[in-house]
Amino acid sequence: MNNEQPKIPQATAKRLPLYYRFLKNLHASGKQRVSSAELSEAVKVDSATIRRDFSYFGALGKKGYGYNVNYLLSFFRKTLDQDETTEVALFGVGNLGTAFLNYNFSKNNNTKIVMAFDVDPDKVGTEVGGVPVYHLDELEEKLGGITVAILTVPAQVAQPITDRLVQKGIKGILNFTPARLHVPEHIRVHHIDLAVELQSLVYFLT
Ligand code: ATP
């Protein structure tokens, strides 16, 4: 996030990429303006929330006109640092890790996995989805200034890898393992346990 921007509540910030993606599509299709009702339908966020979110961006919709698509897009581009690519390292080239490397967030042009690490001799030294796979022993040597990591390793090795990443100055970790990670306060961990997510979905259905 760009520090010169006004402070945006966390919940709002989380919705920014969603808005941004939709607005880019609108822009590509030549639309100049959009109403909060249209946006609401497309991104599945209620329109009162959208109006409140957008008021933080200084984008005040006009009744009967809606929001100016270009204004919003330039705001999002600045706020989300879309001109700068964030390089990401992935740990654990198993089934899930391989899927991420092949997918590589190609629709988001601002994040890119540029290297991966594993310990399996069959994987180390290869490329998956065009991304080189290094041995975990090379972490300190190869990581450089990368500040974001994705963990798709077995749970029991997640913490030791995290500790090494913290030493190297990592800022954010997307943790797909079931392990609860302990990190210093200034480091951000987003935990995505797919099994738990699926179970909780099923729970709400029954
Ligand atoms: P696979 O079918 O390839 O085993 P998986 O996702 O079911 O995939 P896991 O046991 O979860 O397998 O391991 C994920 C990946 O993490 C594997 O490629 C494994 O070699 C790798 N791995 C295991 N230990 C480490 C470690 N300490 N550091 C980095 N990668 C590791």
Image (cartoon, rainbow, N blue to C red):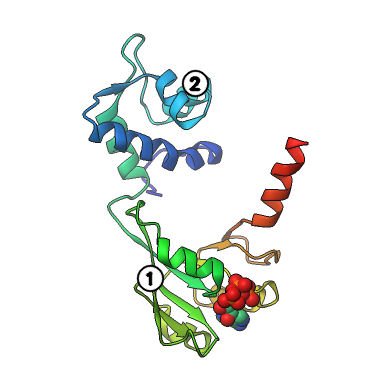
Q: Nearer the viewer, residue 79 or 205?
A: 205
Question: Is the residue 162 above or below the residue 142 in the image?
Answer: above
Image coordinates of residue 165 in percent, x first then y, are 54, 75
Q: Secondary structure at mark 2?
A: helix
**Where does label 2 land, which residue?**
47
Identified at 21% across, 29% down, the residue is 30
Q: Is mark 2 within 8 Å of ligand 1?
A: no
Q: Residue at x 65, y 74 (%)?
A: 154
Q: Residues within 10 Å of mark 2 (few under 14, many from 20)?
A: some
Question: Element at badge 1?
Answer: loop
Real-space CA distance between mark 1 and mark 2, rounded to the nearest whole angstrom = 39 Å
Residue 129, disc? 1
Of residue 110 and residue 146, the one placed in the foreground of this image is: 110
Asked if disc 1 and disc 2 are in contact, CB closer than 8 Å, the reply is: no
**Quadrant in the rendering for residue 141:** bottom left
Residue 26 location (% of width, % of height): 29, 31
Q: Which quadrant of the rendered structure holds the C terminus? A: top right
- Say if 25 sits above or below 40 in the image: below
For this view, does 189 lie left or right of residue 147? Answer: right
Q: Residue furthest top?
A: 64
Q: In which of the image's four quarters is ligand 1 placed?
A: bottom right
Residue 100 is left or right of residue 166, and the answer is left
Q: Which residue is located at x 54 percent, y 41 percent?
A: 10
Instruction: Looking at this view, name the residue that lies furthest to the left.
Output: 30
Left or right of residue 37, residue 46 in this image: right
The three-letter code of the residue at mark 1 reads Gly
Front position among marks 1 and 2: 1
Residue 115 x, y percent position in the rendering:
41, 75
Q: How packed is label 1: few (under 14 Cα within 10 Å), some, or many (20 or more)?
A: some
Please identify the quarter of the rendering in which residue 200 is found: top right
The picture places residue 27, in percent across and down from the top left corner, at 25, 33
Q: Which mark is residue 22?
A: none
